[in-house]
Image (tube, helix red, strand yellow):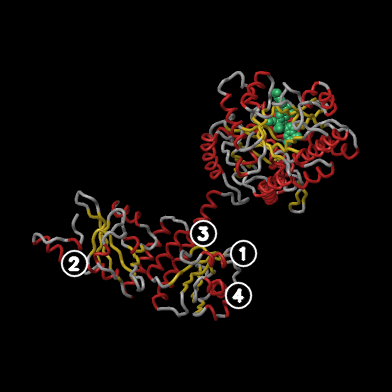
Amino acid sequence: MDLAGAALDDGLPSDRLLRVTVAQWSAALVWAAADGTIVGANPWFAQLAARPLESLIGRPLPALLDLGGRDWSAVWDGAHGGRAPPGIGTLCAPRSEPVPVDLHWQTLTDGSEPLLLCEMRSFDERERAEAVARLQQDVLELVATGRSLRLVLDFLCRQVETCAPELACSVMLRDDENRMRVIAGPSLPAGYSAAIDGLEIGPGVGCCGSAMWRGEAVLATDIANDPLWAGYSDSALMHGLAACWSNPIKGRDARVLGSFALYYHEPRGIAPFHRRLVEACVHLCALAIEHDRARAEINRLAYFDTLTGLPNRQLLTDRATAALALAGRTRQPVTLMFLDIDRFKTINDSLGHAVGDELLVEVATRLKRLFIDGDTLARLGGDEFVALLPGCDAAHASLLAERILATLAVPATIADLTLTPTASIGIAVHPDDGGDFDTLLRQADAAMYRAKQAGRNRCHFFRRDMNEQAVRRLEMEAALREALSRQEEASRTGGDGPFELHYQPQVRLKPPCLHRVEALIRWTHPRWGMVSPVEFVPLAEECGLIDRLDSWVLETAVAQLARWRAAGVPVPGMAVNVSAVRFARGDLPDQVHAVLTANGIPATDLTLEITERLMMTEEVGVHDALDALHALGVTLSIDDFGTGYSSLSYLKRFPVGELKIDRSFVKELDIDAANRPLVRAMIQIGESLGLTVVAEGVERDTQHRMLEAEGCGIGQGYLFARPMPADALAVWLAAEGKVWTDCGPGCCFSI
Ligand code: C2E
Ligand code: MG
Ligand code: MG
């Protein structure tokens, strides 16, 4: 297309006519390509932009023309989709004030590359008034189309700043605690916005705080010397704000909703045009804020229960549908818990609805505290509550149900009566009990009904096997709690408790010698016999007992090491498993230091086995604890390496000294050829990072030989020795284990 004014050739009379038309057109014209490059312009445009016409060709138009908050691609797409409403922009001219301009867009296509023609006119005061009218219309349109309040007010500020580029404006809201909250201020410096956000509204709090306090406009022509700004002026002046005019925004009932403020970069008063802008904008802001509040109220009425403030059935259905769709992709469980207050009808009928309502509010308040972000607790109506728990499996659900029953069972005083609310709970878990919300709700309801039949104040799973598991879990939690207390008591009095530590040797493969022993906890229950740590350690983590359990293990294992050494049993070092949960409490390094010192064991003889899961955490406290333990001289070993986290970058970031290849890889090493390259790769990772590598679960000689051939340093497994009590280990070392303590000078531990 050769309409480019600068490039029009002499040609046919009609071409010349066209050229003259373009050159003498009463408005500035500029043509741009899809990427915003100027391909042509007329002399008016050059004059407005205060640059030679030739120098403009090839430059990006968006660099010269501020589109008042819109970006170029949106304008281009809008125009080509037949929707490029006229707007206001600002043309930047070198060495002079930016020029506010009216913009009209026209697409041009003749079969070759499409162009966008922009016709622009600078506007005078009268035209500015028209711009204000247009601004009002644009803002109202945004409000009507349901855009967020923040977006509407941000747009409003940007449009005002386009009409009057000499100022910056902001909108502040008054919150429930009578503080001011910056909701829009696109060109206010971020540091300044942060400084004023949250200030309490009061008589001498800058222009905005004072305007909201008094309910009338407040002007400071010179912030530096204005008494209202005493205490606040530094931050404004530092950010180049020298004068301010703030106007309260009032609702229909004359209550102050917020403020609309204009800031100037030099001390000055208000121009008449600014007055007109503010009159229009204060009204628009009030309208947008009230519209937003009305919408929120409608939303509240449609989606929330008015008595308890909890989500209602509609919102629960929406959230459950979304959670189940997501769970289908992520394969996460979703639990639905149906809770019905026991004998609520009797309370309602005998004590009246007002008491019933109060009880419902009390129950809702107690329940709310038990759920975490992401859970939804809804009231379906009457005395029925439903909790939607994404990511929660049956085991967690049973613990939570237990907590709910305990929380409800505390007596409440309602209307001078003491009532003890109890409830029956039914639980259904996706995907086992149903794929869609209606089915799950029905199953949870049925389970709740069975809980009622079974005597109320209890929880029932939809499936029988889950009930059995849940009961065992609850029993085990109680037993674990009691066992731990007895153990702690036994440690104080020097007796035996239900827990014991067994020790399993870790041996150096070449030349053979004892490397250290790993302490492994054992629990003997009077009825269940030996309970595996695989079962009770995760339970201890979930019910908050792991700190106590791991502390006991650490103290006992280190004391045992000291006892062996005192008795001349040559055990070179001790490895202790520490749960990731234990790291969350910041005192681990202090405890380790204290235990080592108390027993006279050097930190280098202690290894803490941690899982890869711990490395995933971003918690600063955990990183600090790892660093502190490393600084003490303790070795950190990654247990079950290869089963947890897919990224290995943590190996660089954390002071890890050892990798323990998980049993599952060693198990099939001599059976399934595919395992060998994996084990080789893990050994090489360890080697290249200078880490010790331990292989767990070595049961056969063939595995031993393969590991040795691949260069693995240390082995642990039944082939060498099973975990055994402390006395047995001393016997083993003295007899069978002799070979492991007789491996030549400089290798073995000696005492
Ligand atoms: P882990 O730390 O990976 O411990 C190694 C597990 O493998 C031990 O099981 C050990 O008995 C077993 N094992 C050792 N050699 C062989 C073998 O050749 N073949 C087979 N099949 N198994 C072998 P255990 O003692 O049942 O412990 C299981 C897990 O429980 C431990 O895995 C550890 O994660 C946890 N655990 C044990 N004691 C403690 C403790 O004191 N604190 C914490 N937090 N966790 C512990
Ligand atoms: Mg371990
Ligand atoms: Mg392991």
Q: Is residue 316 above or below residue 222?
A: above
Element at badge 1? loop
Circle 3: element type: helix
Residue at which label 4 appears: 231
**Label 1 to label 2: alpha-carbon separation:** 61 Å
Q: Give the vertical position of 135 relative to 479 (above or below).
A: below
At x 84% / y 27%, what residue is drawn?
730
Q: Earlier in the sequence, mark 4 or mark 2?
A: 2
The residue beneath circle 2 is: 23
Q: Amino acid at mark 4?
A: Gly
Q: Nearer the viewer, mark 1 or mark 4?
A: 4
Which residue in the protein does label 1 denote?
A: 177
The earlier-in-sequence mark between 2 and 3 is: 2
Rendered image quadrant of residue 339: top right
Look at mark 3 in the image and give the residue it sits on: 293
Q: Tell me which amino acid carries mark 2.
A: Ala
Q: Which residue is situated farthest in the left direction here?
A: 13
Q: Secondary structure at mark 2?
A: helix
Amino acid type for the residue under numbered disc 1: Glu
